[in-house]
Image: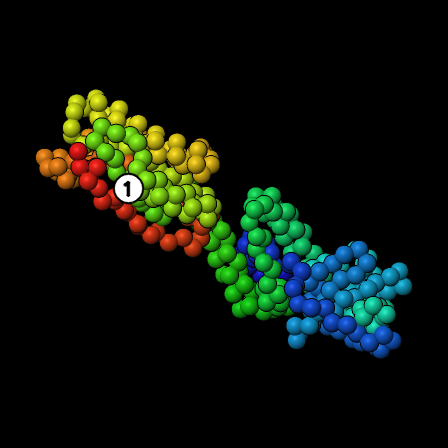
Amino acid sequence: MLKKFSALMLAVLIGAVGVFAQDDAQVRSLTSGQKYKIKGVVVAKDDTSFVVKDGTGVNTRVMIDPNTSIKTKGGFFGGGDKIASSQIVRGLNLEVEGRGDSSGSLMANKVRFGKDDFRVAQSIDSRVTPTENRLTQTEENQQRLSGQIDELVAISNAARGGAKAAQETADAAIAGVNATNQRITSLDDYVVQSATTVNFKLNSAVLSPDAKTQLDQVAQAAMQLKGYTIEITGFASADGSVAKNKALSQRRAQAVIDYLVETHNVPLRRIGTSYGFGELQAVADNSTREGREQNRRVEVKLLVSRGLNQNVEVRPNTTTDTPTSNDQQ
């Protein structure tokens, strides 16, 4: 039976890293001195106790001491093999008998489980625990994949012959791995969150009050994001020589950078690209006065990483200052 499910179990181990995390359900409090018999799955373990989730989804903390009898089922005359308490692992299906103690836990006097269940649980734990550690090191700023008790029960069912449940668990685990891989791949995938255009007077690289207001809004929006970068490009109209317009467009781009850095403390590492195109890439006709006014501009694009902003929406917000009477020179 174990060989029959080896391929499925391997797929589960690759993706269900968080499956053995301690369940968040509240641990029930037992009556002191009363006898209890509990059947369920181990979902958490420490040196002196473990937590069992039964078939109704209720958690019970089980205390163990040197007098607790821990054995596998079967053997000659039902004796079974003695097992050390340290060998009880997460994912093990077992039965516990004992009495409630003063802390509300179950003080076990007998713990029993099948040999096949024991071998499968140990195999799973030996592979999942190192995988949990590697994931924590790799994504220290990300929430670890939450453990789902339904997956844990499915794995246990697979060990006892639940092929369909094991297949569903494997499919879910692989889907989780694919989603994580996609997220990692998207870390370097930047999309435009907003685009703003500020305009300048003729032969000027000085920011107007309206331009500063627009840049204030860009900075405020950026501070609410993770993994953002700001792309800044300067342009000029066709007034004057090509070389002069090239230099003028670069000064305009630098004026925007200086304002964002000096006024809003935007880190330099967040300024992704800055360039002056001169009179190239005009957005309006340079043969008209109105067209040249539109071409005297700096475009500011706020980009965000899809990998660090899963729910990001691209919100084009290109705005252009309407030239005042002072701009029309």
Q: Quadrant of the C terminus?
A: top left
Direction bottom: furthest residue: 34
When asked about the image quadrant of residue 241, the answer is: top left
When asked about the image quadrant of residue 118, the answer is: bottom right
Give the residue drawn at x 39%, y 31%: 258
**Placement of 217 over or under 326, stated as above or below:** below
Give the residue drawn at x 28%, y 42%: 197
Q: Residues within 10 Å of mark 1 (few under 14, many from 20)?
A: many
Give the residue drawn at x 21%, y 21%: 243
Q: Secondary structure at mark 1?
A: strand
**Placement of 157 over or under 212, stated as above or below:** below
Residue 183 place in picture, x, y as percent: 46, 49
Q: In this view of the protein, which residue sits in the foreground, 69 or 215?
A: 215
**Placement of 107 over or under 247, stated as above or below:** below
- Does residue 90 show up? yes
Residue 237 place in picture, x, y as percent: 18, 32
Residue 314 place in picture, x, y as percent: 34, 51
Q: Which residue position is annotated with label 1?
A: 197
Q: Amino acid at mark 1?
A: Thr
- Does residue 73 show up? no
Direction right: furthest residue: 67
Q: Quadrant of the N terminus?
A: bottom right
